[in-house]
Amino acid sequence: MNLPKVNILGVGISAITMNDALSQISSWIRKGEKQYVSVCTVHTIMECQKNDIMRQAVNGASLATPDGMPLVWLGKIKNNRQVGRVYGPDLMLALCELSAQKGYTQYFYGGAEGVPKELSQTLQRRYSGLKVVGAYSPPFRPLTETEDRQIVEQINQANPDIIWVGLGTPKQDLWMASHRNLLNAPVIIAVGAAFDFHTGRIPQAPSWMQRVGLEWLYRLVQEPKRLWYRYLVYNPLFILKILAQSLGIKRYTLE
């Protein structure tokens, strides 16, 4: 399957639907390919503007899904094919449901102490037969080379089909790009706050707010001290940059 990408400020966002994502990921697992998936929001795009290594990491993903509604809207405008929201928490649920049917194994990496284990238990209760082969919460500080090597060995010994990464943007995308060749799992997927959403640590916005692109406002009200810059600075700046790109004032490449 050759899925097109649209150029949003120099970041290639996959013009896909949820079914496209599930089909592609299943294909990678069946073939034993080694790929990774970035789940992208406006925040992801803006982090790529200030860090070229981050932009290379996201552009190196075989799928960079439109998680935020503005990226879905832009994907529909820029591409003739159908584009739907591939929201990280929903992708996790859909893929775990499919995994329970097909026997794909999961590993959860990230989140605060105890969160990945709780997440695995929550999903196993929800999807009978879901196989989880490991869960690990890394320390918030940078890992030593020895620690990092030990974690890689631990994950490879568990031999998962899918590694779920919940380290937050941009850390999770950089981690996937730097570790992709070290890990044997066919698929690595970074899903941001999905770990906290599905364990109930952070409430999700109502579905109507998600549909109309107001999830950012809900999250800002929930965590104003942590998220004010992301939404009150990045969002307006994103709109200005998109206007400049659309008018040809500023050109971006995917290289």
Image: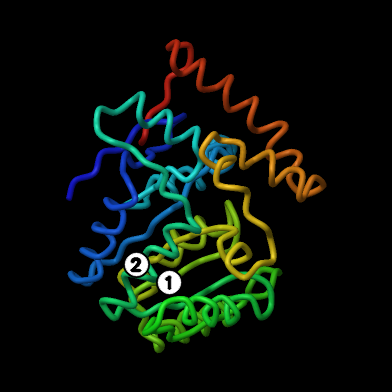
Q: Position of residue 248 (x, y in %)?
A: 43, 12
What residue lies at 33% left-to-right and 37% top-to-bottom?
A: 83
Q: Is residue 100 left or right of residue 144?
A: left
Find the distance from the CA under tag 2 to the CA under tag 1.
Answer: 6 Å
Instruction: Please say whether residue 51 is visible from this viewpoint.
Output: no
User: Disc 2 residue type?
Assistant: Val
Q: Are marks 2 and 1 in contact (CB under 8 Å)?
A: yes
The furthest residue to the right: 225
Q: Earlier in the sequence, mark 2 or mark 1?
A: 1
Q: Is residue 238 left or right of residue 203?
A: left
**Picture layout, residue 33 above or below residue 86:** below
What residue lies at 40% left-to-right and 82% top-to-bottom?
A: 128
Q: Position of residue 232 (x, y in %)?
A: 72, 32
Residue wearing tag 2: 187
Residue wearing tag 1: 163
The furthest residue to the bottom: 157
Q: Secondary structure at mark 2?
A: strand
**Picture layout, residue 74 above or below residue 94:** above
Label 2 Cα neighbours within 10 Å, binned few <14 / some 14-19 / many ≥20: many
Question: Which colour assignment does the render follow?
Answer: rainbow
In the image, 67 versus 210, the foreground residue is 210
Q: Secondary structure at mark 1?
A: strand
Q: Position of residue 57 (x, y in %)?
A: 44, 50
Q: Classify the position of the C terminus by image quarter.
A: top left
